[in-house]
Amino acid sequence: MPSKQGKHITAADSTKAVDEFMAQLDHPDKREIELIRRLILQAHPSVAEGIKWKDPSFRTTESFATMHLRLKLGFGVILHAGAKARDVSISVTDAGLRNWLGKDRAMVEFSDPHDIAIRKAAFTDVLRQWIRQVDSIPVPEPQDGGAMCLSIGAFPSVPSIGAWWCQASFRCLPGPKSAGFL
């Protein structure tokens, strides 16, 4: 499995980027958004965050949640199984907490602070179920046979045979003999 940091290597894929986003955010529910952000980060020890689709997004081995801050009333959290729709089904027990957007996507909406207070425990439970299922989905192999090293510190160590090695033990796939992918 790729590391939570492995395939997310841009400056936008960091807590610093989310901190900067939140500092600039002009939203009537900013305090509540920050509370939900903390709940998501605390749902599992491997959760990391960044900015994706112009909003805070969260990942473990794959992106699994993105905030939706443009609702007319309140805000939402879109639960998904990665950036692209996948042929998987996710099932969670939640007593009607979320609205299904597809078999691999759902949205949980929060309308006010009271709404968050009464749904906090159920939302955390849904997050944990969702993360467990998203983390169990196999990572697709690259289709073009090209290099796909999922580490920020990737380097070609043996270019003559086309092997790519990573710092630490992240998943790397064989790639071409050139070092043009650094």
Image (tube, rainbow, N blue to C red):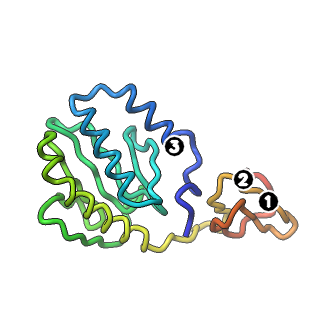
Image position, residue 111 (x, y; %): 14, 42
Query: For the residue labelled by badge 2, is the local secondary structure a helix, a strand or a loop?
Result: loop
Residue under the image location 20 percent in, 70 percent down: 93
Asked if the residue under mark 1 is in contact with the one under mark 2, i.e. CB atoms within 8 Å, the reply is yes
Q: Foreground mark, 2 or 3? A: 3
Which residue bears the numbered disc 2? 181
Which residue bears the numbered disc 3? 14
Look at the picture and state if 9 lies above or below 69.
below
Image position, residue 40 (x, y; %): 34, 52
In the image shown, does 43 or 102 lie closer to the viewer?
43
Mark 2–mark 3 Cα distance, whole angstroms, equals 22 Å
Residue under the image location 26 percent in, 67 percent down: 103
Label 3 environment density (alpha carbons within 10 Å; few <14, some 14–19, many ≥20): some
Asked if the residue under mark 3 is in contact with the one under mark 2, i.e. CB atoms within 8 Å, the reply is no
Image position, residue 11 (x, y; %): 56, 39
Which residue bears the numbered disc 1? 156
Query: For the residue labelled by badge 1, is the local secondary structure a helix, a strand or a loop?
Result: strand
